[in-house]
Image: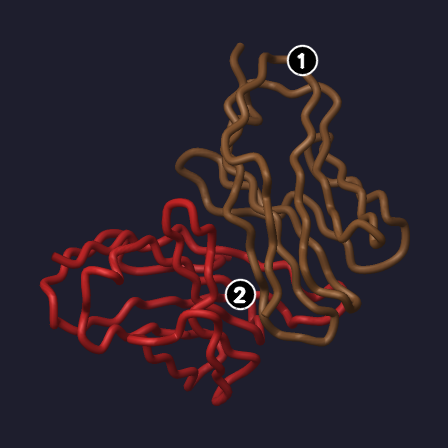
Chain colours: A brown, B red
Amino acid sequence: AQSVSQHNHHVILSEAASLELGCNYSYGGTVNLFWYVQYPGQHLQLLLKYFSGDPLVKGIKGFEAEFIKSKFSFNLRKPSVQWSDTAEYFCAVKSFTGNQFYFGTGTSLTVIP
Amino acid sequence: NAGVTQTPKFQVLKTGQSMTLQCAQDMNHEYMSWYRQDPGMGLRLIHYSVGAGITDQGEVPNGYNVSRSTTEDFPLRLLSAAPSQTSVYFCASSWGTGGNTDTQYFGAGTRLSVL
């Protein structure tokens, strides 16, 4: 089975600070990679995904993530966070030919105005 | 479109009781799945379905049954509830699982407590 590690469990930042959330996965083959976000009281929704092509992926609300195959990583970044980015962030992986999605344990981000 | 609808939103059960969590989607998605979310554990896949009549086990299937008689519905059955099944349950759906079709859309969740 695949596994996904999110190293930061709780992150607290001030507005305008830069954000980087780590995500590493264990599968050695071709993968699809995802970041999902859960805002307080809302559904989980897709932030961005990688399935082929440019390893630097841009998502909604100014987020981006870089797929580094040699490091089995898919870190999420945002140059300047806002209070509205307060949420829980989940990294997920699926093998390209498989049907099962594996999620990390999540990172809770609190942005202080 | 309503998207993915889960009912009920909250449920309290006694140990040994059975119940069904309902999940319906109106996007004509082929792939549907059930997850449980526990503190410090993230989301773990319970069961999934790649189309009507086809289901398979995920990471943590024990104690749960599913069926997929229609494209729209994917109910999750707890056969004999145990306190270890206290969790938040999410249903999700996507067009498929390949290429650019695997973006999952999630329901609002069902918070289940087993006493």
Q: Chain of mark 2?
A: B
Residue B95 higher or lower than A51, as above or below: below
Q: Residues within 10 Å of mark 2 (few under 14, many from 20)?
A: many
Q: Quadrant of residue B112?
A: bottom left
In the picture, measured across the screen, residue B53 lies left or right of residue B78, that is right
Amino acid type, label 2: Ser
Nearer mark to the viewer, of 1 and 2: 1
Q: Residue furthest top?
A: A113
Q: Residues within 10 Å of mark 1 (few under 14, many from 20)?
A: some
Q: Residue at x 73, y 46 (%)?
A: A74
Q: Chain of mark 1?
A: A
Residue A106 higher or lower than A18, as above or below: below
> Which residue position holds label 2?
B93
Q: Nearer the viewer, residue A85 or A13?
A: A13
> What SS does tag 2 mark?
strand
> What SS does tag 1 mark?
loop
In the picture, measured across the screen, residue A29 lies left or right of residue A102, that is right
Residue A16 badge: 1
Amino acid type, label 1: Ala
Q: Residue at x 39, y 83 (%)?
A: B67
Q: Residue furthest bottom?
A: B53
Q: Residue at x 49, y 79 (%)?
A: B71
* Quadrant of the snapshot with the N terminus of chain A: bottom right
Residue A84 percent across, percent down from the top left: 55, 23
Residue B105 percent across, percent down from the top left: 54, 57
Residue B24 percent across, percent down from the top left: 41, 67
Check chain identity for marks 1 and 2: say if they share one: no
Dots 1, 2 in contact, CB < 8 A: no
Residue A60 percent across, percent down from the top left: 70, 37
Q: Residue at x 70, y 64 (%)?
A: A27
